[in-house]
Image: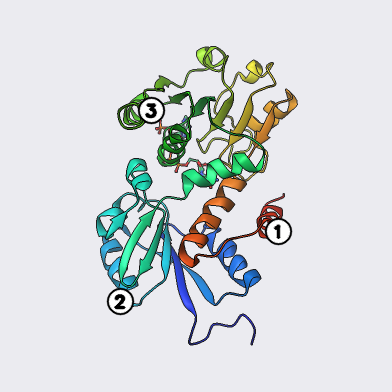
Amino acid sequence: MENMINGRTKVLAVIGDPIEHSLSPEIQNTICKKLNVNYAYIPFRIASEDLKDAVCGFKACNLSGFNITIPHKSNIMQYLDEVSQEALLMGAVNTVKNVDGRLYGYNTDGVGFIKSLQHEGVNVKNKNIVIIGAGGAVRGIAVKMALEGAVQITILNRTVAKAENISEHINRNISNISQALPLNDNHFAETCADCDILINSTPIGMYPHTEASPVQSLDFFNKNDTVVCDLIYNPSKTKFLLKAEKAGCKIINGWGMLIYQAIEAFEIWTGMKIDENMVEHLYGAGKQ
Ligand code: NAP
């Protein structure tokens, strides 16, 4: 009867549309099972027009908490009782905790990314950072890196207006350290010349399009002191990361971010602390 759902089981969930691809149920249920805590974590595909009803239903059913993924991370905020300062700055909530019927919103994506870097011995304080892409994930990680003391954040994007929007938000609300530029192969090496941490946050190179890369001319990787990250974790080494690794750069994929955002959410819901053994167990599950 160990680890069985019973009358005392507390329910957690993840909502998104689509949701079938989400690894969160496996990660969270693995944590619950390993720690022998009586929670069950369930995926729900919720269309945008049903979001309000879903939140009301979760409250009525007294769910302990839930994660939110694409496309609801911003829209969810209007249905919550309180949202953390950091999530407000990021404009997105990915974790909700139910405390006596009041819903509290948090964002664990940014801290998840920072912790995945720290896991590899990398700190963002005083670092010059270049990010390729300006989608939903970037707002969270860029805001968090600015809060953690990065000295410069350059955002390169195909649609430069989106990069400008995030840069201006950081400059106005955190500190004046960000600039936006068009994603352009010709200027890429120049832009990265003094970069300490380079991050691909576009889906380019993700399975099954593993031959693709966000920039064609990766020859600038003749400087090997840049830490090169990709938010993608499938494949575990994108073409972008392989090229950087070959040039001698330290590389970090997106698996750690996925794990740490989940750990942070679990700790918010339960008040428990995940130990290093569990972290290593979860990291091991992502080795491909
Ligand atoms: P998103 O909001 O859809 O943004 C995608 C970004 O990629 C946009 O800036 C887009 O540029 C750019 N892009 C897409 N296709 C492009 C192309 N062919 N050429 C140039 N630029 C292109 O996505 P997101 O939510 O930010 O997620 C981005 C990536 O991060 C995905 O691979 C996702 O799986 C990954 N991610 C990983 C984690 C993790 O835990 N590891 C968490 C979140 C996200 P435009 O603005 O010009 O369209």
Give the residue displayed 69% in from the left and 16% down from the top.
Answer: 222
Identify the coloring: rainbow
Q: Quadrant of residue 123?
A: top right
Single out the mark in the foreground, 2 or 3.
2
In the displayed structure, 34 sits above or below 241; it is below
Q: Which residue is mark 2?
A: 60
Task: Kindly indicate whether the residue at mark 3 contacts the one at mark 2 (C-beta within 8 angstroms).
Answer: no
Horizontal and vertical percent position of residue 6: 52, 86
Single out the mark in the foreground, 1 or 3.
1
Give the residue displayed 52% in from the left and 52% down from the top.
Answer: 261
In the displayed structure, 283 sits above or below 141; it is below
Which disc is residue 84 wearing?
none
Horizontal and vertical percent position of residue 192: 55, 18
- Lower sequence index among marks 1 and 2: 2
- Lower sequence index among marks 1 and 3: 3
Measure the C-alpha gap from mark 1 to mark 2: 36 Å
Q: Which residue is mark 3?
A: 163
- Lower sequence index among marks 2 and 3: 2
- Name the secondary structure under disc 1: helix
Q: Which residue is mark 1?
A: 277
Please state which amino acid type lies under the numbered disc 1. Asn
Measure the C-alpha gap from mark 2 to mark 3: 40 Å
The answer to whether residue 207 is seen in the rendering is: no
